[in-house]
Image (tube, helix red, strand yellow):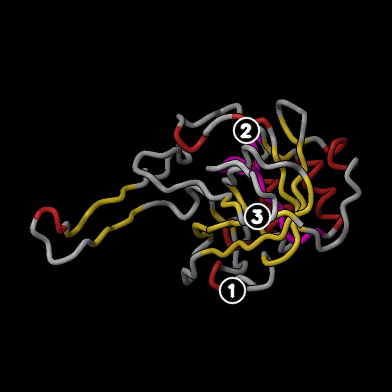
Amino acid sequence: MKTVNNQKSWTDLSAPLTNKMVHWPGEPEVSICKLFDMNKGGPANVTTLSMSAHTGTHIDAPLHYIKNGKDISSFPLDLMTGSARIIEIKHDRFIPIEEVKQHDINPDERVLFKTKNSCSDWAKQEFKRDYIYLSSEAANYLKEKKVSVVGVDYISIGGKDNGKIVHEILLGNEIWVIEGLYLNGIKPGLYEMICMPLKIKDSDGAPARVIVRKI
């Protein structure tokens, strides 16, 4: 990903989908294959793609952890189009409520957390068991603040021990979650964001393309 040089230009925060990129343990690897290849005599170039809906940069729908919750095809189109705030977190193990409280978060805000996860090109590396995640206390605080969207810079917003509860707190209150953001080189501040998932019927999540530009 290119770092921001012209702060008014659009910047892509999406991880490229590649074969064997990092994925959640127990879920299938990304597989990108040529079904037809013109260099091998094929009539056209046709690519097939197989992957979990929760690999790379993606959106979690409420259905991911909430029985009978909304699926990704019911995603509100205006939910992730508009202003979003990127907040840098200094804590090196998780996103603590104490740091989140310092930022005067308002109702309906879209909040994206940049952590030390962004110091490495995580999508090309092995799964990190010590990735930085959102604490349960911070998740409850964001729920109380009635934010609309929370984004993080790794493939899960919750940690090994609190992943289920963090997802339930947010998704159970229809706070949609963006996971797997590429925030290396992006400065904290207010941005205009466009984030759109694939429209997959009955799916609990979907890959997304996320772009921002400085306001």
Name the residue at 72% across, 26% down.
Answer: 92
Name which quarter of the figure residue 113 lies in: top right
Query: Which disc number belongs to residue 117?
Result: 2
Position of 204 relative to 119 (above/below): below
In-front residue for pair 94/173? 94
Label at residue 177: 3
Could you tell me how far apart the alpha carbons at marks 1 and 2 are, in whole angstroms?
A: 30 Å
Q: Amino acid at mark 2?
A: Asn
**Number of the label disc, if any, that sits on residue 49:** none
Residue named by callout 1: 74
Q: Answer whether labels 3 and 1 touch (C-beta < 8 Å).
A: no
Query: What is the spatial separation of the Cα atoms under label 2 and label 3, in whole angstroms?
Result: 17 Å
Q: Amino acid at mark 3?
A: Val
Disc 1 residue type?
Ser
Q: Position of residue 174 (x, y in %)?
A: 71, 63
In the rendered image, the residue lying farthest to the front is 6
Residue depicted at x 71% and y 60%: 192
Which residues are the magenta region? 147-161
Residue 213 higher or lower than 92, as above or below: below
Q: CA distance from mark 3 to mark 1?
A: 14 Å
First in sequence: mark 2 vs mark 3: 2
